[in-house]
Image (cartoon, rainbow, N blue to C red):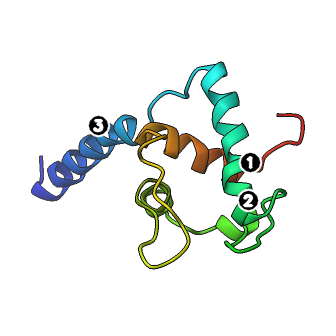
Amino acid sequence: MPARKRASLALAALIALAAPAAYADAPSQTRQAELLYRLRQDCGSCHGYTLKGGLGPSLLPTALKGKDDDTLVHVILYGMPGRPMPPWRFEVSRDEAFWLVREMKKGLRDER
């Protein structure tokens, strides 16, 4: 097998192994409800209760389009020093932060 093909297969295998760690299973239904409540209330207090923006920027899908998931998760977990965005790692796990990012990028339905 040519070296280039071996390298491509090795890279594909690494990506396949890394993906499940970054995108773990969704939280339980109960925890999802808690996270969505916190998103609407706690995050909404700065980002606007409709998440269209306020003190903080919009968290609607159009505003998040093209933004890197890892970067958004990092901001959720560690905040933005020197800015009003606090860290939430004491309350939200990395997997939960990834789930929140995916939910925000899909768009939140009002009935949740």
Q: Nearer the viewer, residue 9 or 20?
A: 20
Which residue position is annotated with label 3?
17
Q: Residues within 10 Å of mark 2 (few under 14, many from 20)?
A: some
Q: Amino acid at mark 2?
A: Ser
Q: Is residue 106 visible?
A: yes
- Label 3, label 1: how far apart the Cα atoms are: 35 Å
Pointer 3 or 1: first along the chain: 3
Tell me: residue 16, above or below residue 26.
below
Q: Residue furthest right?
A: 111
Circle on res. 93: none
Instruction: Name the spot of residue 5 as percent of width and height, x first.
Output: 20, 52
Spatial CA distance of label 3 from label 2 is 38 Å
Q: Amino acid at mark 1?
A: Gln
Which of labels 3 and 1 is toward the front? 1
Residue 79 lies left or right of residue 31; in this view the side is left
Residue 41: give its label.
1
* Residue drawn at 64 percent across, 29 percent down: 32
Q: Which mark is residue 45?
A: 2
Q: Residue at x 76, y 72 (%)?
A: 54
Q: Secondary structure at mark 2?
A: helix
Image position of 32 (left or right of 8): right
Residue 26: image quadrant is: top right
What's the residue at 72%, 65% (across, down)?
A: 47
N-term-proximal mark, 3 vs 2:
3
| Type of amino acid under label 3 | Leu
Q: Is residue 55 left or right of residue 67?
A: right
User: Looking at the image, which residue is at 45% across and 57% down?
Assistant: 87
Is the residue marked by circle 1 packed among few (<14), some (14-19), or many (20+) residues within 10 Å? some
Q: In the displayed structure, would residue 20 be above or below residue 60?
A: above
- Are the two marked residues, 2 and 1, in contact with CB atoms closer than 8 angstroms? yes
Asked if labels 1 and 3 touch by Cβ distance under 8 angstroms, the answer is no
